[in-house]
Image (spheres, helix red, strand yellow):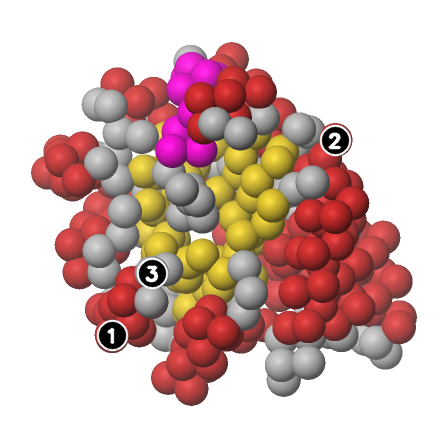
């Protein structure tokens, strides 16, 4: 199937966290099965509150069966929205040992077989994380079927420069790189992601808005911003997405954490079009153009 047809008929999503797709009823079931406390309600109003909920919910997903179940359930959700390709991130630092990785592989295969949806993985490094944990994440990225890139999460007040060596190893292996930068951090965080770490795609990136030089950097290098309107709004952010579009900075809209927001990709496209005056067709086309998992 040609890219031209895909851009007009089917959807791709590039910025969604596996841990953020866990349905509350599923989290409750897994917590009981794994002998864990009941997960919190999906209620928060700022980033700190979100991260507190996110960490506890992520911890409910322990076994390979848990991962396979969560992936399959998100496959069902994607199928109902006409999503046929998704780059989904997961964070190994949130999960103990490595036995669960088999569930990642099996879940991806099940979604492809049942729904015809291709999942490609991004494995997340963590700002300020231990060298051991980040080395483990890169090893998982380099050895797990279906991985097309690495991501970066964590406190944006911490420089990501110490991770440049790991990112370079990922680049050398043919993996893409999508760091979180400029979600709550300012323009300098976005500049570091592009100039120091070589990012061609940035998760959020909206912190670049007040700095003309950083905006020009994004324009000149064709960096794609993977933005999340409803996710931003839930933590009190109100970026001017139209400003980026007017500068011809590539944008794609995403759900980020669809179960916790909650939202769907179809809803995010509608919000982008009606509330932010973005072009739906251009957003859909950009997602296909800027995906890491290209074939042919």
> Circle 1 — which element?
helix
| In contact (CB < 8 Å): disc 1 and disc 2 | no
| In contact (CB < 8 Å): disc 3 and disc 1 | no
Q: Provide the residue span drawn in magenta.
A: 278-289
Q: Earlier in the sequence, mark 3 or mark 1?
A: 1
* Main secondary structure type of the part rendered in magenta: helix
> Circle 3 — which element?
loop
| In contact (CB < 8 Å): disc 3 and disc 2 | no
Q: Is residue 90 above or below residue 2?
A: below
Inspect this view and state whether residue 277 appears.
yes
Judged left or right of residue 167, residue 269 is right
Mark 1 lies on residue: 165
Q: Position of residue 77 (x, y in %)?
A: 74, 39
Q: Look at 10% across and 38% down and name the residue there.
A: 213
Mark 2 lies on residue: 80
Quarter holding residue 291 = top left
Mark 3 lies on residue: 174
Inspect this view and state whether residue 275 appears.
no
Q: Position of residue 264 (x, y in %)?
A: 65, 33
Q: Earlier in the sequence, mark 1 or mark 2?
A: 2
Q: Position of residue 166 (x, y in %)?
A: 31, 73
Mark 3–mark 1 Cα distance, whole angstroms, equals 14 Å
Q: Is residue 33 above or below residue 187?
A: below
Q: Is residue 247 above or below residue 95?
A: above
Q: Look at 74% across and 72% down and name the residue there.
A: 64
Find out whether residue 279 is within the magenta segment. yes
- Label 1: few (<14), some or many (≥20) within 10 Å? few
């Amino acid at each position: 199937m040609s890219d031209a047809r895909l851009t007009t008929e089917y959807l791709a999503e590039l910025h969604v966290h596996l841990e953020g797709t866990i349905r509350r009823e599923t989290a409750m079931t897994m917590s009981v099965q794994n002998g864990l406390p009941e997960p919190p309600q999906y209620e928060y109003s700022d980033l700190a509150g979100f991260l507190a909920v996110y960490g506890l919910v992520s911890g409910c997903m322990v076994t390979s069966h848990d991962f396979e179940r969560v992936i399959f359930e998100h496959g069902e959700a994607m199928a109902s929205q006409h999503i046929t390709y998704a780059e989904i991130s997961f964070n190994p630092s949130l999960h103990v040992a490595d036995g669960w990785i088999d569930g990642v592989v099996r879940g991806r295969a099940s979604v492809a077989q049942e729904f015809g949806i291709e999942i490609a993985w991004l494995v997340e490094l963590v700002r300020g994380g231990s060298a051991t944990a980040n080395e483990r994440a890169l090893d998982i990225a380099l050895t797990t079927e279906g991985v097309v890139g690495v991501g970066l999460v964590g406190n944006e007040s911490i420089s990501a420069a110490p991770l440049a060596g790991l990112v370079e190893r990922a680049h050398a292996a043919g993996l893409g790189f999508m760091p979180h930068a400029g979600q709550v951090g300012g323009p300098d965080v976005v500049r570091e992601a592009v100039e120091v770490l070589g990012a061609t795609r940035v998760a959020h990136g909206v912190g670049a808005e007040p700095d003309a030089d950083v905006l020009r950097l994004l324009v000149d290098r064709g960096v794609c911003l993977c933005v999340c309107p409803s996710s931003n709004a839930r933590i009190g952010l109100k970026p001017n997405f139209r400003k980026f579009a007017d500068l011809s900075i590539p944008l794609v809209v995403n759900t980020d954490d669809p179960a916790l927001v909650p939202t769907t990709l179809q809803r995010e496209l509608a919000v982008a079009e009606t509330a932010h005056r973005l072009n739906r067709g251009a957003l859909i086309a950009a997602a296909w153009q800027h995906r890491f998992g290209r074939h042919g």
